[in-house]
Image: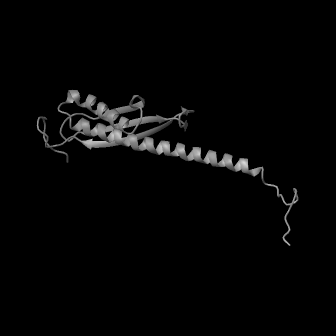
């Protein structure tokens, strides 16, 4: 004869832990999603800095180099699904043979970002830097090709 438990005699305490477990799961998922948002922003900002420097050193002349670099960086950031208006870009260097050019791109990521709601909280600044030399054998530039 099989004996079945009836009533509350067989119930062990711990049912109240289930909502706590769900809360821990939701908080952990939110933490992972926000960490991924920072990693994704870092990838986008790295791409923006790289494209800015490439556009700068390949520009036809010094007058259009900075504008071309800015457009390339914002386009790269938009390609990653980010808001180009929130990009901070600084270019350091000149426009001549063997001159190093450095692009520093920054982007603010909200501390907490929720899908369909947006982000809030103090922003985390993601920063990326890329450096290149202007081609020493490029036509149309004065000076010697001495990158030594």
Up-down relation of residue 19 to residue 122 (above or below): below
Coordinates of residue 137 in the picture (x, y in percent):
13, 43
Coordinates of residue 146 in the picture (x, y in percent):
16, 44
Relative placement, left or right, of 98 versus 40 is: left
Coordinates of residue 138 in the picture (x, y in percent):
14, 40
Relative placement, left or right, of 83 versus 52 is: right
Relative placement, left or right, of 61 versus 118 is: left
Q: Locate the N terminus and report the quarter of the image it occupies.
A: bottom right
In this rendered view, identify the residue nearer to me: 89 or 34. 34
Q: Residue at x 30, y 39 (%)?
A: 51
Up-down relation of residue 25 to residue 87 (above or below): below
Query: In terms of image quadrants, where is residue 61?
Result: top left
Up-down relation of residue 100 to residue 13 (above or below): above
Query: In terms of image quadrants, where is residue 8?
Result: bottom right
Residue 101 visible? The answer is no
Residue 102 visible? The answer is yes
């Amino acid at each position: 004869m099989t004996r079945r438990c009836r009533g509350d005699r067989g119930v062990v305490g711990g049912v109240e832990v289930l909502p706590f477990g769900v809360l821990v799961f939701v908080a952990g998922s939110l933490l992972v999603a926000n960490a991924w948002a920072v990693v994704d922003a870092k990838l986008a900002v790295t791409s923006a800095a790289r494209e800015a420097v490439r556009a700068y050193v390949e520009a036809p002349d010094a007058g259009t180099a900075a504008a071309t670099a800015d457009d390339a960086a914002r386009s790269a950031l938009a390609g990653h699904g980010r808001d180009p208006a929130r990009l901070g870009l600084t270019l350091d260097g000149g426009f001549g043979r063997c001159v190093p050019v450095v692009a520093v791109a920054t982007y603010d990521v909200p501390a907490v970002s929720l899908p369909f709601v947006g982000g809030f909280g103090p922003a985390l600044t993601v920063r990326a830097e890329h450096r290149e030399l202007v081609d020493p054998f490029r036509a149309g530039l004065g000076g010697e090709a001495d990158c030594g």
